[in-house]
Image: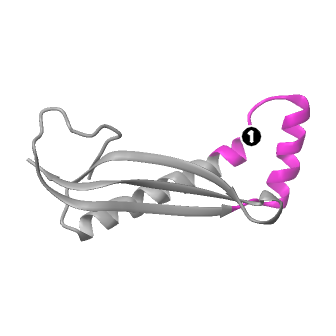
Amino acid sequence: MLMTTTPTIEGRTIRSYHGVVAGEAIIGANVFKDMFAAVRDIVGGRSGSYEKTLRSARETAFEDLAEAAGRLGANAVVGVDIDYEVLGEKNGMLMVAVSGTAVTVE
């Protein structure tokens, strides 16, 4: 499945539009990750555990997006937008949402 943030795909012609599609993933924060992230905040550096979890959530959201487009008969998604939102009490969850327009291209 081709996916792009642009409204067109260079060298391809959009033959039909199937509508807006979306994919979401919501992840909860883990107490141990939070503790180690707090240490990273103090001493500096990147939080590898959070980055890995965030990467996994983003991949899941994109997989959902591709599946939704495929169910509509599309072979590409254009105009993809990625959003991140903190949710829940004490901001303990993160939502990754992706959306775009399902299309058929040549």
- Rendering coords of residue 65 (x, y %): 38, 60
Q: Which sits in the foreground, 47 or 10?
A: 10
Please name the residue that numbered disc 1 is placed on: 47
| Residue found at the very far top of the displayed protein | 44
* Residue 36 magenta: yes
Residue shown at 33%/59% (left/top)? 66
* Residue 60 magenta: no
Q: Amino acid at mark 1?
A: Ser
- Rendering coords of residue 81 (x, y %): 43, 46
Q: Is residue 6 left or right of 103 when viewed as pictured?
A: right
Task: Say if 50 sits above or below 6 in the image.
Answer: below
Q: Secondary structure at mark 1?
A: loop
Q: Is residue 100 left or right of 46 when viewed as pictured?
A: left
Number of marks present in the image shown: 1
Q: Residues within 10 Å of mark 1 (few under 14, many from 20)?
A: some
Residue shown at 65%/62% (left/top)? 27
The residues colored magenta run 28-51
- Main SS type for the magenta part? helix
